[in-house]
Image (cartoon, helix red, strand yellow):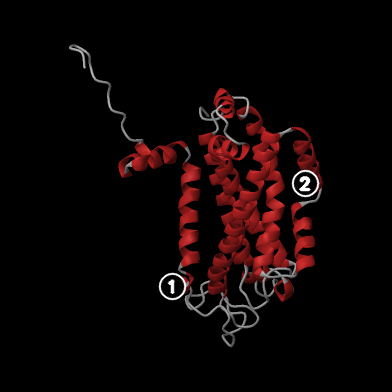
Amino acid sequence: MAAGTKALPIPTRSPFASPSGLGRSLVRFARRKPLGAVSALFLLGFVTMALLAPVFATHDPREFGLETFASPSSAHFFGTDQYGRDIFSRVVYGSRLSLTISLTAVLLGTTVGSLVGIASAYIGGRTDMIIQRFVDAMLSFPGLIFAIALVGLVGPSIKNVAIAIGIVTAPSLSRVVRGPVMSIKQNVYIEAAQSLGAGQTRIMLRHVLPNVMAIILVLATARLGAAILIESGLSFLGLGPSPDTPTWGQMLSGEALYVMEVAWWLAVFPGVAITLVVLAFNLLGDSLRDIFDPHLRGR
């Protein structure tokens, strides 16, 4: 090294790489988006309750023979239903099923929708036209109606419900992802990769996908709430899991509708659970969108 020449500073690690940097980022997020932070904490509690359902539940959710139509009390926090089953325990176990179905469906829908949207925009031409006309055809059906048709064809089960919701989620997500990819593929680094002989698959996975990952994360978070809502609707219509499986939708359907005037708690507590979880997912998704979208960061 020549005399008098200063050495270049060694790059430091990203602040997200250390626990302190991550902590500061979380604090900054909580200050900028308090509703998003509260929603994240609520959802963390929801996930904890779902994973530790046997710990939180006070009774077996399938246990019959308890006092029927017991009002909420210290013995039964949310009361009991017409069969003597504890409502609180069924709501707790229902959260586990809702989390399983929504995560599986959104993971499937996000993966398929993102790959289809990226491929459609990057390849372009006739391929893009054919894919988008197919997406238009799928988007022409309301999501719940489309899910009902799919589950009706293959039969009600947890796996089939998750797959149906994933298929319903994929088209809209692919359409949203397609827009940014149309701009990204015009960048210089994409042309450089092409000139170096990189294949289309490598460019899409190594150069395009990382640049739309923030958008995909926001969309997936928002779709979790919609997935829970669709699953509840399918269970309400009798197209969800088996009747003995505690789900929030099933707790609002069937005979529960006829006894609401006698026992209001049969519908109120499952309905409130659905409302709070869906609202929390939507608020968290909106907050993440505002953080990641450069056009909204200043708001």
Label disc, if present, on residue 163 of the rendered structure: none
Residue at the location (38% across, 40% down)? 27
> The residue under label 2 is which amino acid type?
Leu
Residue 177: image location, x then y, percent: 64, 38
The vertical placement of 61 against 180, above or below, is below
Q: In this view, does 174 lie to the left or right of 136?
A: left
Where on the picture, by quarter, is residue 125?
top right
Residues under labels 2 and 1: Cα distance?
Answer: 42 Å
Secondary structure under badge 2? helix
The vertical placement of 95 against 28, above or below, is below
> The residue under label 1 is which amino acid type?
Val
Q: Reading the chain from its start, which is encountered first: label 2 or label 1?
A: 1
Q: Which of 192 and 214 is in front in this view?
A: 192
Residue at the location (73% across, 68% down)? 239
Within 10 angstroms of label 2, few (less than 14), some, or many (20 or more) residues? some
> Looking at the figure, which quarter contains the N terminus?
top left
Q: In this view, does 137 lie to the left or right of 292?
A: right
Residue 40: image location, x then y, percent: 48, 50
Where on the picture, by quarter, is residue 167?
bottom right
Residue corresponding to mark 2: 139
Judge depth for marks 2 and 1 and give the one in front: 2
Label disc, if present, on residue 55 of the rendered structure: 1
